[in-house]
Amino acid sequence: MSSKYDVLVIGGGNAALCAAISARRGGASVLVLEGAPKFYRGGNTRHTRNMRCAHDAATEILTGPYTEEEFWEDLLRVTGGQTDEVLARHMIRESKDILNWIVEQGVRWQPSLGGTLSLGRTNSFFLGGGRAMLNALYLTAEKLGVEVEYDAEVTDLVIEDGMFLAARLKRPIKGDTEIRATSLVAAAGGFEANIEWLKQYWGEAADNFLIRGTPYNRGSILKMLLAKGVQEVGDPTQCHAVAIDARAPKFDGGIITRHDSVVFGIVVNKHAQRFYDEGEDIWPKRYAIWGRLVAAQPDQIAYIIFDSTVVTSFMPTLFPPIAGQTIAELAGKLELDSAALEKTITEFNAAVQPGTFDHTILDDCRTEGITPPKTHWARRIETPPYLAYPVRPGITFTYLGTRVTREARMLMADGKPSANMFAAGEIMAGNVLGKGYAAGMGMTIGSVFGRIAGREAARHAKN
Ligand SMILES: Cc1cc2nc3c(=O)[nH]c(=O)nc-3n(C[C@H](O)[C@H](O)[C@H](O)COP(=O)(O)OP(=O)(O)OC[C@H]3O[C@@H](n4cnc5c(N)ncnc54)[C@H](O)[C@@H]3O)c2cc1C
C-alpha cells in the first residue's frame, strides 16, 4: 500500500465497490478497506438477489415499465412519508441510469424469480445472486487498479473540523497502520450485528434477535462519525426486519431462512393467539413488517401455521415445517397450549368467508367477525398434516445513519457540508428510509449513492 490515496473507501459491499469503481473511473487512486476476511468479503450484499430501479419501458428481464412517479409513490407508502423527498426523488431518478451502469461494471441480470415475490416488473435480479454480483464488481475494481485490503478493520478515524485526515486500522497479520487520503467514502454498513447497541433501544429482547447478514456490520464507523460531529439521521429503532426461521444461525443465515408463507396461513404467538392481519397487503410490500411484529410478542417468538394444501405455494424452505396429524399433536411439538391453538384455529376457520383465492392480487378471501381480521387470502386450515414454522425477528439492516446531501457528502451537526467525507449504502439509508421498506431498495441506495460518492470523492481529490 502506498501511504496516501486520493480516495479511501471503508467497507467491502455494494456501496463500497460502486464508490471505488466510480472514483477510480474519475481518475483517483483508490484503496478499499474491508474489515472481513476475503472469504466473507461483501457484507450483507453477499445475500442479496435483486435491485429496484425505475425504468420507462419493459426490458429483456423486466416485464413492464416502473416509472419514477410509481417508485416514489411506493416509497411514500412504505415509509409513511418519513423520507427526505429531495434526496429520495434524486435517488429514484439516478436509479434509472444504474440499470445500465451496473452492467457496464460487469454485473449480469436474470429474469425475476416467481412464487410470492411478484417483483418481475419492478426489480432486476442478479444473475447468480449477490455474491456473483460482488465478484463482478471486485473483478472490475481490481482490473481498473483499485487496491483492496482484507482483514482491515478500521478502528479509528482522524477527523478535524469536519475534514477527514486518516484512518487507523487493525490488521491481524500485517500489523496495525494508519492510512491518509484526500477523500473518504464511508460504506461500512449499519449496526445490526452489534447486539449491545441494539439493546440500547430494544432492551433484553435484542438477545432473541437473529441477524440475517454479516457479523462484521457492527456500526463502528457510524459511531465514530457521529462522535466526531457528523449529523445523524433516522430513528435508531427503525430497521428492516423480517420473520425468519427460529432455527437459523445467529448471524449470516441469509435469504434461505426467511419465510414467505405468512399469507398462506395464520401467525400465532407463544400463547397461541393471532396478533396481526396476515393478509394485509401484497407480500413484497408487507413482508418487512413481520420482524417488528414478532419482536413485540412475548419472548420474541411466533409460529406460522398452515395446512398441507398450501405447501407448494411458496418457496421451499431450508428448515422443514414441523408437522402434526392433529392440531393437538402440532401444538405439542411447538410446546403451545393445545386447547388454545385449537380454539384459535376453530375460530379462524369459522370466520373465513367464501371467495376466489389469488395470491397475486388483493383477493376477496377474507374473514368476518374476528380480531384481528385476515383481510385477504383467508382459507380454512383443515387438511392434515398441519404444519408450522417457528419464527423470530431477523434483523436485516438498521436505518440510523449519517445525513448526506445529494452529492452523498456528509453533513456536519452544525449543518455545514463536510469538506471531504462521503457516505453510501446502509450507513446513510435512513436519509431515504425513515421506516418501512420496499424490496430491492437496499441495493438501490448503495448503488446510486455509492456511484455518486465515488465520483464526488474523486472530484474533490483531483481539485
Ligand atoms: C439476507 C439478506 C438479503 C437481502 N436481500 C436484498 C435484496 O435482494 N435486495 C436489496 O436491495 N437488499 C437486500 N438486502 C439488503 C442489502 O444487503 C443491503 O442493503 C446492502 O447490501 C447494503 O450494502 P452496503 O454496501 O451498504 O453494506 P454491506 O454490503 O453490508 O457492506 C458493509 C461492509 O462494511 C464492512 N465493515 C463494517 N465495519 C467495518 C470497519 N470498521 N472497517 C472496515 N470494514 C468494515 C463489512 O465487512 C462489509 O463488507 C438483503 C440483506 C440481507 C441480510
Image (cartoon, rainbow, N blue to C red):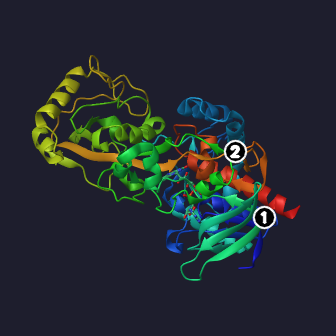
Q: Which mark is residue 96?
A: 2
Horizontal and vertical percent for residue 250? 37, 58
Mark closer to the chain start, 1 or 2: 1
Label 1 sits on residue: 25
The answer to which image quadrant residue 310 occupies is top left
Q: Is residue 36 above or below residue 93?
A: below
Quadrant location of the C terminus? bottom right
Image position of 34 (left or right of 286): right
**Residue for point 35% across, 46% down:** 205
The answer to which image quadrant residue 349 occupies is top left
- Look at the numbered disc 2 and give the secondary structure of its residue: helix
Q: Nearer the viewer, residue 246 or 300?
A: 300
Horizontal and vertical percent for residue 287? 43, 39
- Look at the numbered disc 1 and give the secondary structure of its residue: helix
Within 10 angstroms of label 1, few (less than 14), some, or many (20 or more) residues? some
Q: Is residue 250 above or below residue 338?
A: below
What kind of residue is marked 2? Lys
Horizontal and vertical percent for residue 440? 55, 46
Q: Is residue 91 above or below residue 80?
A: below
Q: Which mark is residue 306?
A: none
